Image (tube, rainbow, N blue to C red):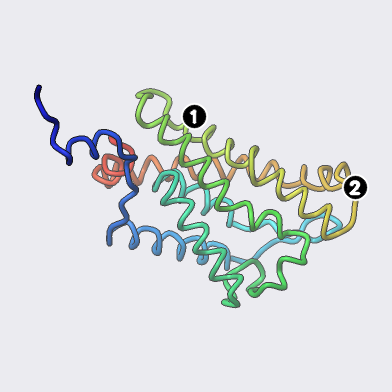
Amino acid sequence: MRTIPADATSTSTSTPRLRVGARDLTLISVFAALIAVLTLIPAIPVGALGVPITLQTLAVSLTALVLGAWRGAGAAALYVVVGLAGVPVLAKFSGGLGVLAGPSAGYLLAFPIAALITGALATLVLRRVRRLRLLWLFLAAMGGSILATHPLGILGMSLNAQIPLAQAAAYDMLYWPGDLLKNLLAAAVALRVFKAFPDLARRNFGR
């Protein structure tokens, strides 16, 4: 009877581990800083609750499209954690745990989840689709918005402003036109990044 080496057995039955290298940490840090920089561009208050329109969602979408699911989520989470720790990198130059009591708290907390979803969908697109990538990357970014950013944003407005979900959803509709434009721009910029740095796309998405 042929014996199977112990190391071969453990390799075949073990779960693949997520390896984080120095380059990954650098990319996560750089893109977290990018989100912070774009956030500091003056915000536009909209609606009765004054939840501002910022470039945060553009930055989060771009980060996820370029870095993929877990790196994109890591960058968005790092940005959120730094802001909640008190560094004034959030909308309107704010920071600290007090922002969680505001009407935009749900949108903020949704960023890592939205990045995870967008990055996962972008990975599917870049590995399987060769044509109309701009459209598919745009749809990937919208997937994160539809499944995470807007639902959690509505919930946050409803809870913190003590208004019905239906009313919060009506306020949220004000942000959809800008969201469509920002996600389209994020997809276009991501394609430019991949053309300029093809190694980044191959490393992150296997293409």
Residue at the (45%, 40%) spot, across then down: 188
Residue at the (38%, 23%) spot, across then down: 131
Q: Pointer 2: what residue?
A: 164
Position of residue 30 in the picture relative to residue 102 (left or right) = left
Position of residue 23 in the picture relative to residue 124 (left or right) = left
Residue at the (47%, 40%) spot, across then down: 187
Question: Where residue 96 sits: x, y (%)?
Answer: 65, 75
Question: Where residue 170 sits: x, y (%)?
Answer: 84, 43
**Callout 1: SS:** helix
Q: Earlier in the sequence, mark 1 or mark 2?
A: 1
Position of residue 131 in the picture relative to residue 40 (left or right) = left
Residue at the (52%, 52%) spot, across then down: 60
| Crowd rating for badge 2 (residues with CA inside 10 Å; few <14, some 14–19, many 20+) | few
Q: With respect to residue 206, does 70 lie above or below?
A: below
Q: Nearer the viewer, mark 1 or mark 2?
A: 2
Q: Pointer 1: what residue?
A: 135
Q: Which numbered tag is attached to residue 121?
A: none
In the image, farthest residue toward the front: 1
Q: Could you tell me the amino acid type at mark 1?
A: Leu
Which quadrant of the figure has residue 40?
bottom right
Quarter that holds the C terminus: top left
